[in-house]
Structure formats: C-alpha cells, structure tokens
Amino acid sequence: MEMPNTSPPTVTLEALEAKYAVAERTSAANYAFYLGATNDNLDVVRALDPTAAAGIKVFMGSSTGNMLVDDEKTLAAIFRDAPVILTTHCESTPRIQQRLKAAIERYGRDIPITEHPNIRDAEACYLSSSKAVELAREHDAQLHVLHLTTEREMALFEPGPVAGKSITAEVCAHHLYFCSDDYAEKGNLIKCNPAVKTRADRDALRAALKSGRIDIIATDHAPHTREEKASEDYVVAPAGLPLVQDALLSVMELVHDGLLTLPEIVVKTAHNPAVRFNVRERGFLREGYHADLVILDDRAETHVRRETVLSRCGWSPFEGSRFRSRIDSTFVNGHLAWHNGALVEHDRASRLAFDRQSRY
C-alpha cells in the first residue's frame, strides 16, 4: 500500500487511477495506493470511493514531498468528512522549524546527523499525534497513526486486539531495529522522518507491540540514492530508507532475542493489516483466501551486502547486518515470486480489494 508523496503526487482521483494502471502492467507484488490530502483538495477527499484506495494519507508534519496539511479548518474537515480510514504522519512542523533554526545558529551548515532526533524530537511527535487522536475522537473518524517513534506517544493508544478499535497505531521495522546509538556508524543512511530516537524509545515501541498498543508493523520505504544520502549538508540530505527487502528479517531478530513470538509477528505484519484496512480475503491462512505466503528458514543466516540489494537505489541501511533467518520462498496469489535468493518472473500480482462502506 504505497504512499502518495510521489512524483506526481497522488492528490486527485485521476492520479490515483493512473497509478493502478501502471501497477497492473508492471507490479510483481499485490498493490494498493493511498490518496493524499492537501490544504486544497477537500472535495477530492469527499468524493473518494472507499474501495478505491488503501486510505487517505494526511501529512500533519512536513516530510518528503510538499503535502503538509496545516490549515486548521481543512484538517478538521478532513477528519469530519473522510469516507475512509485516515493515516497520519505526525510531527509538529513549527516545533521542528524552531529546533532547526536553533541548530543552524549553533552549527551553521555543519549540523551533525546526531542532532536529527533532537531537531525532530519527541515533543514534535507528541504535539502532532495527540492532535490527530483528539480530532479523531471529536469527529468519530477512523484513524491509523503511522511510524510512531517515542515512548511518550504510547499512552495515546489503547492496548489489546485491533478488532473494534477506531484509533490504531503502527511502527516501522527500522524504528524497532535502530536507535540513536547507531547514528555514529550509519550517519545519513538512517536519517528518516520521524527520526530514529533513543534506545529507551525503541524499547518502549517493542513493549507496546507486546501489549497491543501498537497494532501493525510496516515499512516506510523511501529509496533515495546513496549519492543523495551522502550529502554533508544536513539540511540537503534527504530523509528516508529503502526497507522492503530486509524488513521481515530485521523484525525476526526480535523473535530470536525472545522479545516477541513468531505468531505475534504474523499478527502484526499480516492479520492486523488485513483486519484494520478491511482487505478482502488476505492476511490469513484460510481456505478460499489468496495464497500470499512466505517460507522462512529460522535456522539459516542472511548477510546483507551491497551486491545483494535489489532496490534500484542500490543500498540498504542494514548492510553489514547478519540476520538469523533467511527467506526461502515467497508466493504471490499462489505463484512462486522469490526462491533461493532470486526473483521469479510472474504476472499474477493483483490489485487489493477492500470490503468497505463510507464511514464504516
């Protein structure tokens, strides 16, 4: 389910359908797309068929792309009128701008990457995510808060099973794996928005998975080139990581460390996304469901090296990692798509279908 901050941005119904047309011709994986909300496309948001998109993405903090929704009246109207689940990127842009200005005054253009989690700090996240939860409650909206990063934010969400919740939470694989200690080695390669934060924050995210405060594990795939990431200018270096290829193996490390069980990983990566987004006949091993399967060897290792990276950007933030699992095979709609370290050509990928009604 791909985000709308692409080129061109997916902020019209025509752009949304154009993406589906491209995916139908070229995608090796099953697919769906988000419609993006802006300060001036409220009519488009209201007109969306609830079955036509994964959801509506609202950037309540500026990130990659120019889709910040910062008009208070528009934001309230989106939460009030959206016909489908809202997913939010939550960071306070005024707070970030204030912190960035202070960093520039201190360091000039030589801001060290270790300042990234201080510029995009826990307070910036909480100010925005608490606002999203407040709006969702006020307008009885379906809300899913994306890529949470802080211990403080966990108090905003209720523990327990995802079924029946109207406000849910998500964490990304890289925020479960990396912490601020890793900036010294990884530098800009783990610069992302929201920022990778402290070890205590990472531990709180892991605990929230166990308690059910966080419902879904996902990725925030953003494949900037290595050359772009290599900029010595903090402001210029883009935020975002290529993550899809190694996400599952990185999460499996939590199983090997005894922090989560394999069934809990299945719930957070397969069952809960299907339930929360009303995906038809997927996410479970059930008769009559599409056979989207992965065969995982938890007794074999995977060493992440530059030459094994499949993303066109040509690098991975996990380079140098040795995971204690290996993906043997992947099936898309029952057809082999990956086996023994190589992609298998196939034409069986399909558009995800959603069982929904407006304001479900």
Image (cartoon, rainbow, N blue to C red):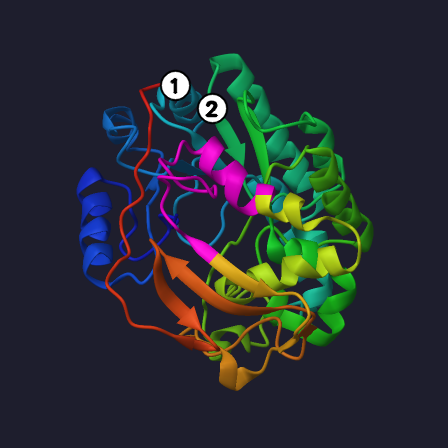
Is residue 246 highlighted in magenta? no
Could you say where residue 282 lies in the image, as x and y percent from the top left?
40, 41
Amino acid type assigned to the residue bearing label 2 in the image: Gln
The number of numbered discs placed on residues in the rendered structure image is: 2
Could you say where residue 266 lies in the image, as x and y percent from the top left?
58, 46
Instruction: Using the rendered image of the protein, determine whether residue 119 is visible from the camera's viewpoint.
Output: yes
Q: Residue furthest bottom?
A: 307
Secondary structure beneath disc 2?
loop
Q: In the image, which residues are magenta?
A: 267-293
Marks 2/1 in contact by CB < 8 Å: the verdict is: yes
User: Residue 360: which numbered mark, if any?
Assistant: 1
Could you say where residue 335 lies in the image, as x and y percent from the top left?
33, 61
| Residue 57, quarter of picture | top left
Q: Separation of disc 2 and disc 1 at Cα?
A: 8 Å
| Residue 352, quarter of picture | top left
Instruction: Using the rendered image of the protein, determine whether residue 237 is visible from the camera's viewpoint.
Output: no
Q: Disc 2 marks which residue?
A: 142
User: Residue 104: which numbered mark, if any?
Assistant: none
Amino acid type assigned to the residue bearing label 1 in the image: Tyr
- The residue drawn where x is 29% and y is 46% is 10
Q: Is residue 162 left or right of residue 331?
A: right
